[in-house]
Amino acid sequence: MIDDKKSQIIAAALKRFSHFGIAKTSMSEIADDLKLSKANLYYYFPDKFSLIEAIVYQIMEETDVSVEQALAEIPDTLALLIKMLDLKKEYFEKYYMLVINLHEMNISEEKWQSLSNQLFQREVQTISRIFKKGIDSGELVTFDVATTSELYVAMIRGLALFCDHAAPHALIDKAELVRIIQKQKQAAYIFVNGIKK
Amino acid sequence: MIDDKKSQIIAAALKRFSHFGIAKTSMSEIADDLKLSKANLYYYFPDKFSLIEAIVYQIMEETDVSVEQALAEIPDTLALLIKMLDLKKEYFEKYYMLVINLHEMNISEEKWQSLSNQLFQREVQTISRIFKKGIDSGELVTFDVATTSELYVAMIRGLALFCDHAAPHALIDKAELVRIIQKQKQAAYIFVNGIKK
DNA sequence: TTTTGACCGATTTTTAAGAAAAGTCAAAAA
DNA sequence: TTTTTGACTTTTCTTAAAAATCGGTCAAAA
């Protein structure tokens, strides 16, 4: 089965990527792990980026489950936003090696742009659903959900960027991460308060 | 007069720095502009950083005037915050070459840390005064002003970082800047709303 | 007190060679 | 036909040495 083989490759690649980061993993190493030739690997994935993409999509689906569950179980807007932050932290800790040293990869700018844009829009979509839910339940005032969700996600991500700004691109330690999440939660609290009825 | 000479040097340095950025301006060039020897320049400023520092302090004093004026004239919290954003934009446009390519300078990390920390704390102080004023006038609820001001500034700066994230360290164009300020204003609006009585 | 030319050491830039990695392809194996 | 491979090309990264630049110093002159 061709899809089965692809899954095997994805699994092997994810292992390497998670250990050493994407930039420091070569296609040959992944092929060797599976006792394939590099040429054979390229038969299934036309280039390194498409392999990365496949992994990202798989993680996206994985996160979807948790997000849907939270959306079904938690009625309160603030509680939902905080749950999302906790989930993000969880997945970040699990996969953060994937985003390390990405800057020293020579993949075309547009491709990264496209992928990170998808991730951003996905997050905005989730926040949109949360806000809509809050409006429908009468918890929040009426507002432009699309714009406001985008602003919220930008703010949350921006806070992370700013707090991490001291040590750019270095490995982040756990204590720092906790501090960032705390800031984000404070911001989420005030933000929700600002759009409450 | 020694202070007069220092002012001349600062002016000449500011010209070069504003044109080509700090990293791409050598001490010799500044000295040549003033028809001084480099050694003579070092008589007035012991190193490059102290010259940068002097310039930053001068700009600080310049901005102080505008900030004080706004604080005296504008009573409304949101209007004040928006005024601050407009002022920041103004000064950024005037001096943004000063912050370009700073990363490729080999000045000790602590010195930068210290200086940028001063700038941050200064901004937090200004925001604190605005928030205190809002609390005193009964416009805002009571809250921890120090923490909240820090969060606000981090959020505003984070938004700028995030919006600029697409093209990191590149020269920013005017349209992009306008978009960033707009986002910041939206965020300021919701933030103030979230701490209003 | 102010100014300078000559000098030093550290950092950056440049250049070139070599290694390593991404990606290709014709042909063999299944 | 689908899958696999070894051998190959090309692009990128690494390394090392040479040259240039720059921040900073100092003794001595003005």
Image (cartoon, coloured by chain):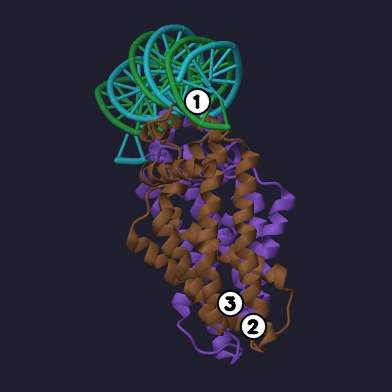
Chain colours: A purple, B brown, C green, D cyan
Residue lying at 42% horizontally and 64% vertically, measured from the top left: B90
Residue closer to the observer: A151 or A53:
A151
Residue at which label 2 appears: B134
Residue B150, how many percent across, how many down? 66, 65
Mark 3 element type: helix
**Residue A100 vs residue D21: left or right?**
right
- Which tag is nearer the camera, tag 2 or tag 1? 1
Residue B62, how many percent across, how many down? 50, 60
Quadrant assignment, res B111? top right
Quadrant assignment, res B125? bottom right
Q: Answer yes or no: is residue A4 visible.
A: yes
Residue A56, how many percent across, how many down? 50, 52
Residue at which label 3 appears: B191
Quadrant that contains the C terminus of chain A: bottom right
Mark 1 belongs to chain: B
Mark 3 belongs to chain: B
Residue lying at 63% horizontally and 46% vertically, measured from the top left: B113
The answer to whether tags 3 and 2 share a subunit is: yes
Q: How many marks?
A: 3
Up/down of A78 relative to A64, above or below: below
Label number found at residue B39: 1
The answer to whether tags 2 and 1 share a subunit is: yes
